[in-house]
Image (cartoon, rainbow, N blue to C red):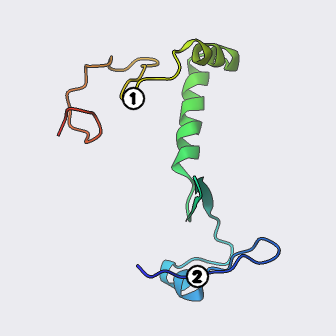
Amino acid sequence: MATIRVELAQRGQVAIPKSLREQHKWDPVQQFSVLDLDGVVVMCPRESQIDALANQLRDGLLKDGATLEGVLTGLRASPTPREPGTCETVGSGPSPGQYNGNDGLTPGHD
């Protein structure tokens, strides 16, 4: 992976080099999701998965009849801060400790 330097123009624009635009087949109207990861800026030429997951969560909560006030009340009542590696289940799903699979993320599973 080569490092390519670009310059931020006075009006806040950044030109993506032609070689990258051609390599990735980006048109002049290509839209990007821009994420700021604590000072590291990532441009992704597709819809952010964060947005899609937030939409799924919203749709599920609305389907279950949840209200914004109810969700906020539940969040305020939860213990803060959470201990690393702990979670709470919401809705119907396996209870903590029921998952025995290997997802590569759950502590204790290789």
- Amino acid at the residue labelled 2: Arg
Residue located farthest toward the left when viewing the structure as drawn: 110
Q: Nearer the viewer, residue 8 or 51?
A: 8
Which element type, helix, strand or loop, lies under badge 1? loop
Residue at position x 41%, y 17% from top?
A: 92
Residue holding disc 2? 5
Residue at the image point whose x is 59% and y is 18% from the top: 75
Q: Quadrant of the C terminus?
A: top left
Q: What residue does disc 1 label?
A: 84
Say if 80 sits above or below 17 in the image.
above
State the image coordinates of residue 85 (x, y, percent, origin top left).
36, 28
Q: Which mark is residue 64?
A: none
Q: Is residue 16 left or right of residue 49?
A: right
**Residue 17 picture quarter:** bottom right
Kind of element beneath mark 2: loop
61, 71: nearer the viewer: 71
Residue contact between numbered discs 2 and 1, judged by CB atoms under 8 Å: no
At label 1, counting other C-alpha atoms closer than 10 Å, the crowd grade (few under 14, some 14-19, many 20 or more) is few
Percent x, y of residue 18: 59, 87
Q: Which quadrant would residue 26 be assigned to in this image?
A: bottom right
